[in-house]
Image (tube, grey):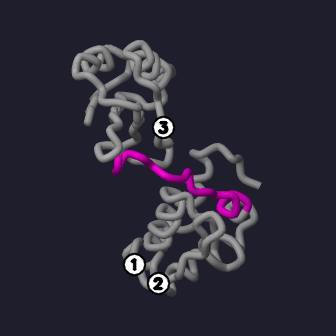
Amino acid sequence: MYSLVRVAMWNKIQELMGQHHPERLRVARLCIENGLAVRDDGIYLNRIEIPTARIARAAGVDRRTVVETVRMIQSDTGLRDIFELFQSAGLSLKGVAKQLGLGVVEISAQDPKNVGILASASKLLADAGISIRQAQVDDPELSPEPKLILIGDKSVPGNLIPEMLKIRGVARVSVY
C-alpha cells in the first residue's frame, strides 16, 4: 500500500494517469478538489452519486474517460483505499458572506508550509472582537495556489490588513 502522505498520493496518481492519460488526471483532480469519493463503480458527493456525464462536463472530458478513471482507481488497492474515503468539506459561507453580514479574509502565503499563519490570523481577528464562523485551508500539496479563508461574524476592519501582512510567511491579504 502507498504511503498516505499527500505528496506520495499525488505522485502515484500522476504516475498512473498523467503521463499517458492526462484527461484521467483531470478527473482525479476534480474528485480531490471537490471531495468526491470513488466507490461502487461511481463517483459520489458524500452519499449522493454524481452522474458520469456531469463529471465529464466539469472535467472537460468524455464519459468514457470518467468510467476508465473510476476503473483505474478501483483496480489499484492504494488509490482505491484513498479515493473511497474522500468526503466533501461541506458548505462554504464565502459566497454568501456579504448577504449575511459576515466578513471574509483571504490569505495567500509565500510558503504555505509555514507554521502559525492560521493561528496568528485567528488571534488578530479575536483581538478585534471578531468571532470566526468558518475557516477553510487549501491543502498546499493538492492546490496550485492554496489559500486560507477566514469568515468572521462581522466585517473585518481595514486596519487589520497591514497587521496580517506582518505575519511571517504571508504574501497577500484580501478582505471583503
Nearest to viewer (mark 1 / mark 3): 3
**Residue for point 63% across, 63% down:** 46
Tag 1: amino acid: Arg
Up the image or down, 103 lies above or below 97; here it is above
Q: Which mark is residue 57?
A: 1
Direction from residue 96 to residue 26 in the image, left or right? right
Determine the residue located farthest toward the left in the rendered image: 158
Mark 2 lies on a secondary structure that is: helix
Where residue 79 appears, as percent x and y from the top left, is: 67, 62
**Residue for point 57% across, 81% down:** 68
Give the mark nearest the N terminus, 1 or 3: 1
Mark 3 lies on a secondary structure that is: strand
Up the image or down, 99 lies above or below 54; here it is above
Q: Which residues are magenta?
A: 81-96
Residue 7 figure quarter: top right
Mark 2 — residue? 53
Magenta span includes 149: no
| Residue placed most toward the observer, 172 or 151 | 151
Q: For the residue carrying disc 3, how many other residues have a C-alpha within 10 Å: few (<14), some (14-19), or many (20+)?
A: some
Q: For the residue carrying disc 1, how many other residues have a C-alpha within 10 Å: few (<14), some (14-19), or many (20+)?
A: few
Tag 2: amino acid: Ala
